[in-house]
Amino acid sequence: MGLKGKLVTSVEVKCEGHSIHDMYHTNTYHIRNISPLVNHVEIHEGEIFKVDAVVSWKYVEDGKEKLLKEVIEAIDHHEKSITWKVIGGDVLELYNSFTIITSNEHEWTTTTLIYEKKNEDTPEPLALLSAFIEVTKHVQDHLLMK
């Protein structure tokens, strides 16, 4: 069993995928008001959601508050994707490295988790992936109410 892993999920959304991308890219602060799973979003360095910005999230995973600190490595406006490298927080207690890629097209939103476990007993990050799916559904529902 390898220590490196990759999980990918694509969720069909009822709103345009670019709307989800715009929420994550330009209106990220609003996500904490939209999803009960996101408690706090803070920019520590850089400009609002630009490459090299350092962002932290307090979120709920399996009923427990967690912290995730990331640096934005890439934003592709054409492909509607954002690549985040985790640089701190609870995730790095279990993983040596962790990258999150969100991408959106038409009626689909995709989340990719790329990681390296600290050891073979480390579980797959299914709870975090599930949290991303739930937040995406909350954002979709919010956008459909507009």
Image (cartoon, rainbow, N blue to C red):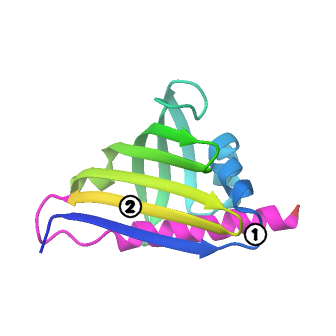
Q: Are marks 1 and 2 in contact (CB under 8 Å)?
A: no
Please say whether residue 30 is one of the residues in the magenta stretch: no
Please say whether residue 141 is one of the residues in the magenta stretch: yes
Q: Which residue is drawn at 18% across and 68% down?
A: 122
Query: As drawn, is 14 to the left or to the right of 9?
Result: right
Q: Give the range drawn in magenta.
A: 117-145
Residue 1 at x, y percent in the picture: 12, 75
Q: Give the numbered dot on residue 106.
A: none
Q: Which residue is drawn at 36% across and 51% down?
A: 99
Label 1, label 2: how many angstroms apart (C-alpha)? 24 Å
Amino acid tagged 1: Asp
Q: For the residue labelled by badge 1, is the local secondary structure a helix, a strand or a loop? A: helix
Residue in the foreground of this view, choosing between 19 and 145 = 19
- Looking at the image, residue 16 lies above or below residue 79: below
Residue sticking out furthest to the front = 78
Of callouts 1 and 2, the N-terminal one: 2
Q: Which residue is drawn at 43% across and 62% down?
A: 112
Residue 126 at x, y percent in the picture: 37, 73
